[in-house]
Image (cartoon, rainbow, N blue to C red):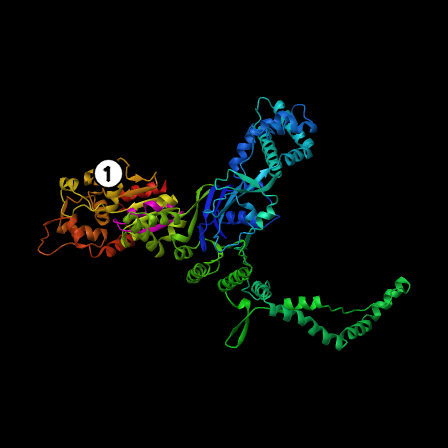
Amino acid sequence: MKLVEMSITNYRQFEKADISFDDGITVLAGANNSGKTSLITLIKNIFNDEKSIYCESDIPAKNMQNWIGQVYPIFETFFLGNAAIEKIEEDLVEFILSKDEKAQQICIDTTRLRVHVSYNPEIDDIKYFADYIMDLDEDKHDFFFEYYYEIKRTKFIKAISKEFEKLKKRFEEIQNNKVRLSDFTEEREKHNIEIKERYLKQRLVALYVNSIVPTCYFCDATYENRCQIDDVKQFRNLFNFCFIKASRPLDDDASDHSRSISKQMIKLAQLDGEWNELIDKLPDDILKPIQDKEISKKVQETSLNSLKETITAVEETNGGQSGELMLDMLVTEEDISDLLQRITTATYCVDGYFLGEESQGLGYSNMIYIHLQLNKYENSKDRCKVNVFFVEEPESHMHPQMQQVFVKYLIEHYKDGIQGLITTHSNEMVRVAGITHLRVIRRTGSFLSELYDPSKLINGLQASNNPDDKLLANFYDWFFEIGYSELVFADKAIFYEGDTERLYIRKLLTLEKYKKLKQQYIAYIQVGGAYAKNYRQMIELLGIKSLIITDIDYSKDAETVNEINDSIITNATIKEFYRIDNPESTPTVKDLYEWKASNKNIISDGLIYTCFQTKDDGYARTLEEAMLSQYFSTDVTMSFTKKEWIKKRADSRLEFVIPTKGIKDEDPIKLRAILKSISGSKTNFMYSVVLNKKAEETEPNYIRGGLEWLME
């Protein structure tokens, strides 16, 4: 039995979230507060926790606001009119939850969970699922369920009736305050009325939510034809779920006596028949010498002598009716069994020394704890059920190398019969898991999140008949593995060409004017101009606002303005993005200047901004040309004498090479010649910019414009 997909709607920050499950391990990644725990909590409440309570905080706020906005006037009209308990159903609830099937009910859009399960008819036993078959097609092997938090009309009526007098009193009080303050001149009183109305609205929502009950249906593939399951317990019985929470109490201090690992080891050992047989015998074996040595009798005699004075004093105050007061010892098999459980503890044998479980660090203990939980779960596997375990943020306390090894082990070990969902905010775990196992949660608003599935993008590219798509799939797989997985967690991304660009951009972002960017998580992705275009589909999928900083790369031989304008560029990314609106064209530099000036370099619905040098950067073709052009207020067509360049270098303290061979002090040298000379020492030049605090003074216009756009 396999869990194929879950589809969640209207739950906390999720309007809709579809999560598909791999045959083995699925990794759900997202930054802190993105919603990973929310999804796991919902799944746990539905499948494992019969006592879970559905409350207002589980419903998207706008759904509640829409509902109360429609029904509050209905409540107000009823309670300020001829309200009576006997008329609640007829004169109030009927206008909200009408019995008439043709009438539109005013309901809160509450949480729904749709579950798709498939099976292999050759190996799977569907005896638990047989009653829920909706499609008799022999070629289809799927089950579909919908778990829905549904309002019950009778409960709603009962809830309103129970608080009838209180609600009526509050409506009348608010109305009287409004009449007394008809001109609304008193702001304080007006505010008090608003607060009272707000609390009343919250109470009405609470009455509604408290009248909701979980209901489960089995459905067809469209979820339109459905039949109700008598009891949600029957639905839960189809699944064998295990949840390992992020907050795991572990020992790394002698003062901590939770002994979580010991307890888990005992639970695992209890699954073994020989262990249980041994434990069953031990209480008798321990009890026998206690009885043989008459220890209980000795305790009685000793306590009787010790308490003699106390007994005498008691007798003097109650007329000698106390009887003999003593300590007795009653030892049962249950007491011995409890003792064995308490004194059995996990130890590490290291070079002949036995160390307690607290002797290991939290990371190591955390890993052992998870393994013990999973081993116990493996022993509970039921081939007639859907077996899925959930591990929340296993990276807790683990260093990066341990994270890598651990998630790799899980992926390789769990491939047959047991599925697993790992939630994480670890870049290392995401990188090792790879795109095909990855699902991503990203925040899209102040209290909104969305779930993305990069694996579908990769699978689509691999299934394509276009060779370029297959190459792109391999590109994603390879470059994701070597470290570009940080895109998953980034608020925004900056793509750059080389190490000097990275050094310079990071320095620029320390400036006060870019403070807003510094406060966000920026992914820095090194990629050449020929490959930046490859990231377009991934950027669009994840919805990451991205800045691509690249060189225009026109011909090095073009030195006059006319030659530059007519030049053809070699930058593959710029050309491909330009051809979105100008297919089959070969743009000149002049075309690209105009393209950028009209903001058409911003593509993918405003997600991607491609910035490169323009005439405002002195007609530069590279970053270094643009920086020197900005600092010295020049352009690539202008010249300075060798003597002037030497003085500029000394005054600026910037490291760049001035050509000297066969050149006299008064000979003119263009900026392009300077750049040719420093092509082998770009790092030294960039270090001199940073160390001499010249980053802002050398900042080219094209980079400034890009960073300002990214900061918006």
Q: Residue at x 23, y 51 (%)?
A: 652
On the image, the x and y values in percent for residue 449 come to: 46, 43
Looking at the picture, how far across and down is residue 526, in whole percent?
A: 30, 52
Q: Is residue 64 visible?
A: yes
Count residues near mark 1 (Cα–Cα under 10 Å), then give few for <14, some for 14-19, many for 20+.
few
Horizontal placement of 413 versus 648: left or right?
A: right
Magenta span contains residue 530 = yes
Q: Position of residue 295 (x, y in %)?
A: 76, 75
Q: Is residue 419 above or below residue 283?
A: above
**In this view of the protein, which residue sits in the foreground, 195 or 244?**
244
Instruction: Determine whether the residue tagged by mark 1 lies in a helix, strand or loop.
Output: loop
Q: Tell me if I can see residue 244 in this picture.
A: no
Q: Is residue 325 above or below residue 395?
A: below
Establish if 645 lies above or below 64. below
| Residue 14, placed above or below residue 387 | above
Asked if the magenta segment contains residue 226, the reply would be: no
Q: Could you tell me which residue is drawn at 65 percent across and 33 percent down?
A: 157
Between residue 30 and residue 687, name the one nearer to us: 30
Q: Position of residue 372 (x, y in %)?
A: 53, 63
Position of 162 compared to 130: left or right? right
- Which kind of residue does numbered mark 1 sit on? Pro
Which residues fall within the magenta stretch?
515-538
Q: Quadrant of the C terminus?
A: top left
State the residue position of label 1: 583
Res 279 → quadrant: bottom right
What is the tally of numbered marks visible in this picture?
1
Q: Quadrant of residue 208?
A: top right
**Nearer to us in this view, 50 or 589:** 50
